[in-house]
Amino acid sequence: MRDIEHTIDVTAETLYEAIAAALAALQQDSWVEEIAQGLNTISVLVQQPPVKHEVKMKDFLSWLDDQEVRLQKWLLERECARFW
């Protein structure tokens, strides 16, 4: 991958939600090439007050997997509760 930097403004409640929103928005643009995963770093600059975070893509993907597992567990519990 080439050293290309993309910037986008998003609004989110948490750091990882901001990353997810930014990646989703960037992937919708045809001019954005494939976004590399693994050890690549994503920088997040928080406004009011300004705070910069750097997160390894692998850590974000791990968080995303955890969210999916939690959602699946919640849906399963909800479905089971309907039968009791």
Image (spheres, rainbow, N blue to C red):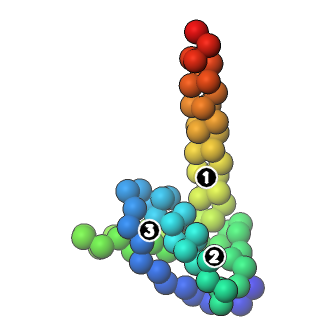
Which one is in front, 24 or 63? 24
Place of residue 2 in the rendered image (x, y in percent of width and height, measured from the top left)? 71, 90
Q: Nearer the viewer, mark 1 or mark 3?
A: 1
Q: Position of residue 65 (x, y in %)?
A: 65, 48
* Nearer-N-terminus badge (1/2): 2
Quickly name the residue at label 3: 53
Q: Earlier in the sequence, mark 3 or mark 2?
A: 2
Between 67 and 49, the one lying in front of the other is 67
| Residue 33 located left or right of residue 10 | right
Extreme residue toward the top, this view: 84
User: What residue would you read off at disc 2?
Assistant: 27
Q: Look at label 2 and name its amino acid.
A: Gln
How many numbered discs sit on the rendered protein? Answer: 3
Circle on res. 64: 1
Alpha carbon separation for disc pair 1 and 2: 16 Å
- Type of the residue with mark 1: Leu
What residue is shown at x 60% (from left), y 32% (from top)?
75
Q: Is residue 55 above or below residue 80?
A: below
How far, Cα to Cα, is label 3 from label 2? 21 Å
Q: Nearer the viewer, residue 78 or 10?
A: 78
Instruction: Using the image, determine if residue 2 lies above or below residue 48.
Output: below
Nearer-N-terminus badge (1/3): 3
Give x and y (percent) for residue 15: 44, 60
* Marks 1 and 3, how far apart at CA: 17 Å
Task: Specify few, some or many for label 3: CA neighbours under 10 Å numbering under 14, 14-19, or 20 or more.
Answer: few
16 to 44, vertically: above or below = above
